[in-house]
Amino acid sequence: MVLRVEFEQFVESARRVLKDPIVAVSADRLGSRITATNKGGSHIVSSTSSGKVENVADDLTKAGFEVIHGEWLGSDSEADSGHFSVAAVAYKSHEAMPGLWMEAFSEEPSKATVLRAIFDEFSETGELQGTTLEEFLENTHPNVVILSPDQIRRFLDSRSKQK
């Protein structure tokens, strides 16, 4: 089980939930990701901070924690479910409404990877018979949006705070 808390509550929460926690700190797109567990690892306390990994690790060491570099994950399935990106492509279609295509990726894709994926899917389904990638891009004027795991997590966190 994973308990996600604001960084300001991390020290208190880790001490309250875990006996002799070992804290792991890793780089995050916006700063640092902090996770703590203890031997047995059935519970994890997780947070993020805008601080640099070295500064966060120093602060947590001063707070009395054993700190290592890395990230604790509950299980392979939890790791996979928490670290994916979602991409959406809005595009001009032959219908009155624009088209929208979405896909999930196990790693954050580039815009080129996303555009290749939509083109390949549409080609395989027969929607683009005899059309090149360049023609597809020119005719559809695609707009690509990619949500990273951190952005998805922030959306979920903000929704849970609203309830």
Image: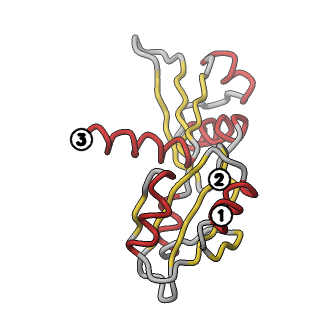
Q: Position of residue 129 (x, y in %)?
A: 61, 31
* Residue at 71%, 62% in the rendered image: 58
Q: Amino acid at mark 1?
A: Val
Q: Which residue extends farthest top?
A: 96
User: Residue at point 58% right, 77% down?
Assistant: 22
Asked which secondary structure carries label 2, the reply is: strand
Helix, strand or loop under label 1: strand
Camera-nearest residue between 15 and 49? 15
Residue extending furthest toward the left:
163
Tell me if 38 is positioned left or right of 107 in this view.
left
Q: Which mark is residue 163?
A: 3
Q: In the current view of this chain or complex, which residue is farthest to the bottom? A: 40
**Which residue does the image show at 66% across and 59% down from the upper left?**
59
Marks 3 and 1, the one that precedes in the sequence: 1
CA separation in Å, label 3 and label 1: 29 Å
- How far is the residue under mark 3 from the one under mark 2? 26 Å
Crowding around mark 3 (Cα neighbors within 10 Å: few <14, some 14 to 19, many 20+) is few
Whether residue 157 sits left or right of residue 150 in the image: it is left
Quarter of the image where the C terminus is located: top left
Quadrant for the N terminus in the image: bottom left
Element at badge 3?
Answer: loop
Amino acid type, callout 3: Lys
71 or 105: nearer the eye? 71
Q: How much space separates mark 1 and mark 2, taking CA atoms?
A: 7 Å
Kindly check if marks 1 and 2 are in contact, taking CB atoms under 8 A apart as contact.
yes
Residue 144 sits in quarter: top right
Among the two numbered marks 1 and 2 on one chain, the one whose residue lies closer to the N terminus: 1
Callout 1: 10 Å neighbours few (<14), some, many (20+)?
A: many
Point out the frontmost of discs 3 and 1.
1
Asked whether the beta carbons under mark 3 and mark 1 sit within 8 Å of each other, the answer is no
Q: What mark, if any, has residue 25 been given in the picture? A: 1
Q: Which mark is residue 32?
A: 2
